[in-house]
Image (cartoon, grey):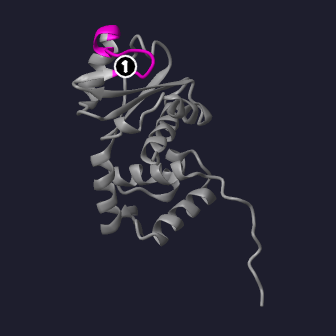
Amino acid sequence: MTQKAPGPSATFSVFHLVRAMEVIGQKEIGRGKLAEDLHVGEGVARTIVRRLTEAGLIGVSKAGCFLTEKGLRLWKEYILVVKKAEIDRSELNPEGHSVAVLVRKGGRKVKSGMEQRDAAVMSGAKSAITMRLERGCLVIPSVSENVNKDFPKAAARVLRVLKPEENDAIVIVTADDLEKAEWGALAAMWTLLNAE
């Protein structure tokens, strides 16, 4: 009886799988372009496509990768819970590139915000600020009970771009480049989705 050699460990994370679903959810895409968008090699992209195909989330045709019915259902659930957007500079993010991510009903999972900051920084971001909407007011734990009053430009941008509802969590992730801010936002989001 022969066993398969273990080979090298995977060179991608769960964030690559989530990001691949985001990209494929927006448009049908070829594996080469997907590799570019994910900033991984062709071999890693093949593995990501294989894993998502085996999970029944995507299919592959001559035109590229597409969401299956199962993948489309998951994508629709995802966009009901998660919203991401590039956000302009303000008092809370005065330099670099920033991406804000909203997790619906994630406000109760926000503790100090350090969990989101640590995850974002470990993914290449410079900083992350976590807030939640409480009684119609944005709150940053241990920093501001009224972001709308203390940081009016930041509050206005978050409210305009993300349109949070009561008990939503928002994380603004800042990095030297947009790609690092995106990965940091995914990492911060993941801490909220997986929190008890």
Give the residue displayed 28% in from the left and 54% down from the top.
Answer: 76
Quadrant of residue 91 in the image?
A: top left
Which residue is disc 1 drawn over?
A: 88
Give the residue displayed 37% in from the left and 62% down from the top.
Answer: 66
Q: Which residue is more in the foreground, 109 or 74?
A: 109
Whether residue 60 is situated above or below residue 39 in the rendered picture: below
Q: Is residue 47 left or right of residue 165?
A: right
Give the residue displayed 66% in from the left and 53% down from the top.
Answer: 11
Is 34 inside the magenta-drawn segment? no
Furthest residue in direction bottom, as rendered? 1
- Residue 182 image position (x, y, % from top left): 47, 36
Whether residue 187 is situated above or below residue 172 in the rendered picture: below
Q: Is residue 68 visible?
A: no
- Residue 163 image position (x, y, % from top left): 23, 30
Indicate the quadrant containing the N terminus: top left, top right, bottom left or bottom right: bottom right
- Residue 90 image position (x, y, % from top left): 39, 13
- Residue 26 image position (x, y, % from top left): 33, 50
Whether residue 4 is situated above or below residue 158 in the rendered picture: below
Residue interval drawn in magenta: 139-151
Q: Is residue 149 left or right of residue 14?
A: left
Q: Which residue is more in the foreground, 169 or 99?
A: 169
Label 1: few (<14), some (14–19) or many (≥20) C-alpha neighbours in 10 Å: some
Q: Is residue 16 visible?
A: yes
Is 141 inside the magenta-drawn segment? yes
Q: How many marks?
A: 1
Which kind of residue does numbered mark 1 sit on?
Asp
Q: Is residue 123 left or right of residue 193?
A: right
Quadrant of residue 171 in the image?
A: top left
SS class, disc 1? loop
Give the residue displayed 41% in from the left and 56% down from the top.
Answer: 29
Main secondary structure along the magenta-highlighted residues: loop
